[in-house]
Amino acid sequence: MRPRLALFTLTALALGACRAKSDSEAMAGMPGTGVDTTPATGREPVHLSFEQARAIGVTYTTVTRGPLERTVRTVGQIAAAEPNLADITPKIDGFVDELFVNATGVPVRRGQPLLTIYSPMLVAAQQELLTANRLAASVDTSDVEAWRNAEQLVTAARRRLAYWDISPDQIDRLERAGEVTKTLTLQAPFDGVVLEKMVVKGQAVMPGMKLYRLADLSTVWVEGEVFEQDLGLMRVGAPARVEVATYPGRSFAGRVSFVYPTVDEQSRAGKVRVVLLNAGGLLKPGMYATLFFDVSLGRDALSLPAEAVVMTGERNLVFVVGADGMLEPREVVLGARAGERMQVLRGVREGERVVASANFLVDAESRLAGGAGGAGMPGMNMEKKQP
C-alpha cells in the first residue's frame, strides 16, 4: 500500500509543478503584462542576505520610465554647399583681353566684371545686329511683310547675342551707340569667393572651358560619418551642433539636410549632411569639425543603469529582486544606450528593483546553482533559498 501511496504523491506533486509552470508562462504571455518574466535558462535564483550584499558591494536600482535622450558624436569636414557653386565658362571662341579677378580666394560681388574676351565671332554678331537695325529703320512701315521680316532679323540678332551671355544692358548700349564692342565681359553671378582660377591674360579660350569656380559661402555643408548602429537615429530636419577648433568654446547650430542611402563597407559608417548658416564667413571649406546630434529615444522609454546589465555576448541579463528577496535572473532585450543608461525594450517592468553593482558575482553563483559549472566566488557563501 505504501508504494502506491508514494507513487500517487509524486504524481500529484509533478502535476502541481507543471500546472504552476503553465500558469506562470500563461501570465507572462498575457496581453497587458508587457514583459516575459521567465527566468533565464542555465541560471537559478539565488538568495543574498544583507550582510552578504554589503560584503561584496551589491547595490540596487529601480527600473524607471520617462524621456530618454542620447548624444551621437562624430567628426566631419566643412565644404561649400553644392547648390551654391558656379563655373564661369565662355560660349564663344576668343582670347582673354583683360583679367580683372586674377587670384584664387578673392571675394567677388554679384555683377562684378571678372574678365573680358575678344572674339571675332562676337564682333561679327554685333555687326549683324547693327545692320539689322539700319534695315528695319529704312523699311517702309506701310509694307507690312517687309517690315515684319526686318523686325524678325533684329530679334534674331539680339537673341544670338543673348545666347552668348551678352547682357540686355550691353545690347541696349550697342544699339544706342551704334558702335561695335570688340570684347565680351563675363560677370560674377552672385556674391561669393573664387575657389578656383584656371585662366591667365592672353589665353585662348573655347566654348565650355572652365575659367573660374565661384562659391557662395553664406551657407556651408558639414558632412560627418555616423556608425551603422546610430544611423537609425538620424532624421532629416533634426538639430545638430557643430564645433571647430578655430573657435574654442563656441558652437554653431544647424540641421540635418540629408542622410546618405549607402554605408561604407570598410568603416561601416554612413554619411550625414548638416547645413549651417555662415554669417561673417567664419566657417571655411576644409575645416575639420565635431558634430553633436541630440536624439530622443522616446518620451516614455523604459530604462535602467547600464552597469545593471550582465552582457554575456549571447544575451543580456539582469537580476530582479523578487517579493521573497530572491535575485531572479531574467533575460532582457536592450535598445540604444543613452549615456550611463540603457533603454530596455522587453524583459522588466517599471518599478522593479534590480541588482546595480557586483552583478557579475551574483551571476557566477546563479550559474553555479543552475548547474552551469564553475565555482562560487570566495567568501560569498550564497545559497538557493529553500522552500
Image (tube, grey):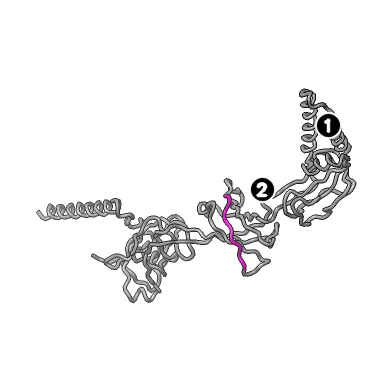
Residue 255 part of the magenta-drawn span: yes
Residue extent of the magenta highlight: 250-258
Could you say where residue 72 lies in the image, as x and y percent from the top left?
54, 59
Find out whether the residues at labels 1 and 2 contact each other: C-beta distance under 8 Å. Answer: no
Between 85 and 38, the one lying in front of the other is 85
Could you say where residue 152 lies in the image, as x and y percent from the top left?
77, 29
Dividing the picture into quarters, in which one does residue 207 lie?
top right
Q: Seen from this angle, which residue lies furthest left?
A: 1
Dividing the picture into quarters, in which one does residue 168 lie?
top right
Task: Identify the secondary structure beneath mark 1.
Answer: helix
Which residue is depicted at the point 60% across and 53% down?
A: 273
Main SS, magenta region, reads: strand
Please tell me how many numbered marks the rendered image carries: 2
| Residue 268 visible to the viewer | no
| Residue 294 visible to the viewer | yes
Residue 101 part of the magenta-drawn span: no
Please state which amino acid type lies under the numbered disc 2.
Pro
Which residue matches tag 2? 83
Which residue matches tag 1? 137
- Tell me if 349 is positioned left or right of 160 in this view: left
